[in-house]
Image (cartoon, rainbow, N blue to C red):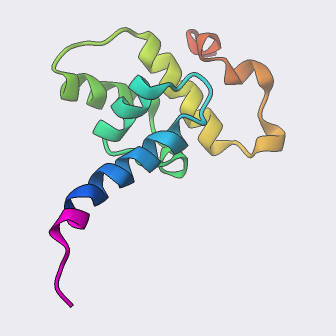
Amino acid sequence: MPVDHNTLLVMPSVIKEQAIKELRQIPGVGKSIANDLWEIGITDVASLKGQDPQQLYERSNAVAGMVQDRCLLYVFRCAVYYAGTPAPQREPEKLKWWNWKEIT
């Protein structure tokens, strides 16, 4: 059966679209930050488990070619918490990215 090249061209954008949609489930993650995560290789919520938010932030800065606002780091901290904590155990205050500014 011949390969439909039009389908092959559309597939990556469909995959990215689905990944962005899933990543946007994370509190504080909108379309822009979901795209930032995609750009550094995070394609789903599960792939955030066990990640180091600081390293994610540094990778994102490298891809962007500049140091981004530290609020992005706080969102990454929240996202890693969200991914690594089962839903019934998530603390509501920890699902607000701005509460990740200071880590104790």
Image vertical order of residue 79 relative to residue 7, above or below: above
Q: Is residue 32 left or right of residue 91?
A: left
Query: In the orientation shown, which residue stands out farthest toward the right?
Result: 88
User: Is residue 50 in sight in this rendering?
Assistant: no
Image quarter hosting the C terminus: top right
- Position of residue 25 in the picture relative to residue 34 (left or right): right
| Residue 94 drawn at (x, y percent) | 70, 22
Q: Position of residue 47 (x, y in %)?
A: 47, 50
Front residue of 92 and 25: 25
Foreground: 52 or 59? 59
Residue at 43% x, 17% y: name it: 72
Front in this rendered view, residue 2 or 41 = 2
Q: Position of residue 1 (x, y in %)?
A: 21, 91
Queried whether the magenta region covers residue 91, the answer comes back as no
Residue interval drawn in magenta: 1-8
Q: Is residue 89 left or right of residue 38?
A: right
Residue located 60% across and 10% down the image: 98
**Residue 102 figure quarter:** top right
Q: Looking at this rendering, what residue extends furthest in the bottom direction?
A: 1
Above or below, 7 against 24 in this view is below
Q: How many marks?
A: 0
Q: Is 6 one of the magenta-colored residues?
A: yes
Image quadrant in which you'd find residue 10: bottom left
Residue shown at 62% from the left, 26% from the top: 27
Q: Quadrant of residue 54?
A: top left
The answer to whether any part of residue 83 appears in the image is: yes
